[in-house]
């Protein structure tokens, strides 16, 4: 627990999800006051979890190391059938660019192309994007949907799911 007037569990999330975005395989770090096996941690977390939340994997990390840092996120979202062909064309146009400036909701201009590592339609109707994280203002999945002219459909017919997070240590091969 943290110290002070209002103690809280010592836990951190490398990247909290945006409101309205579902997540699979999310990551969080938790400081423990006692030594437990990985199996015991998973068991206790699942016993305390609300319905629909399941802990599948845990890993012991070195005490006093820096917290995990997000390197990339993978998002998938089902597209309305009437938008697939148009979206495929927009993806090709977008990927052929070396940069593509968009203005975020807060008025900051960002290069949406610089963060897109993967952008494709898979399984005939699922948009998949892998976005890397850089320092400073980043484009996110909303800005990529804007480029693809799909932002107006967001949360009406398109519901994003972050299917995977890649941490900096994973990217460097230090699992």
Image (spheres, rainbow, N blue to C red):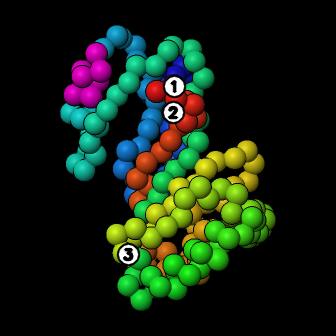
Q: CA distance from mark 2 to mark 3?
A: 29 Å
Picture residue at 25% right of the left edge, 50% below the top: 52
Is 159 a magenta residue?
no
Q: Is residue 110 left or right of residue 66?
A: right
In percent of width and height, residue 138 lies at 69, 55
Is 40 a magenta residue?
yes
The boundaries of the magenta stretch are 37-43
Report the residue marked by disc 3.
125
Placement of 172 over or under 85, stated as above or below: above
Foreground of the two, 105 or 27: 27
Report the residue marked by disc 1.
174
Foreground of the two, 135 or 132: 132
Outermost residue toward the top in this view:
35
Q: Is residue 127 left or right of residue 37?
A: right
> Toward which corner of the image does residue 169 lie, by quadrant?
top right
Placement of 129 over or under 1, stated as above or below: below
Report the residue marked by disc 2.
170
Q: CA distance from mark 1 to mark 3?
A: 34 Å
Picture residue at 40% right of the left edge, 67% below the top: 122
Proximity of marks 2 and 1: CB atoms separated by less than 8 Å:
yes
* Disc on the earlier residue, 2 or 3: 3
Proximity of marks 2 and 3: CB atoms separated by less than 8 Å:
no
Question: SS of the residue at dot 1?
Answer: loop
Q: Residues within 10 Å of mark 1 (few under 14, many from 20)?
A: few
> Toward which corner of the image does residue 84 lie, by quadrant?
bottom left
Q: CA distance from mark 2 to mark 1?
A: 5 Å
Q: Main secondary structure of the magenta part?
A: helix
Q: Residues within 10 Å of mark 2 (few under 14, many from 20)?
A: some
Question: SS of the residue at dot 3?
Answer: loop
In percent of width and height, residue 105 lies at 69, 69
């Amino acid at each position: 627990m943290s110290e002070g007037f209002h103690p809280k569990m010592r836990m951190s999330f490398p990247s909290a999800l945006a409101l309205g975005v579902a997540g699979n395989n999310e990551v969080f770090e938790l400081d423990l006051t006692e030594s437990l096996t990985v199996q015991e941690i998973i068991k206790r977390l699942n016993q305390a979890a609300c319905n629909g939340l399941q802990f599948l994997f845990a890993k012991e990390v070195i005490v006093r190391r820096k917290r995990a840092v997000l390197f990339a996120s993978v998002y998938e979202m089902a597209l309305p059938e009437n938008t697939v062909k148009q979206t495929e064309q927009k993806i090709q146009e977008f990927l052929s660019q070396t940069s593509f400036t968009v203005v975020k909701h807060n008025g900051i201009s960002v290069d949406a192309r610089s963060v897109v590592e993967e952008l494709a339609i898979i399984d005939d109707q699922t948009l998949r994007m892998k976005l890397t994280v850089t320092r400073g203002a980043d484009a996110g999945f909303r800005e990529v949907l804007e480029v693809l002219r799909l932002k107006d459909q967001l949360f009406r017919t398109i519901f994003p799911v972050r299917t995977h997070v890649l941490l900096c240590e994973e990217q460097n091969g230090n699992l």
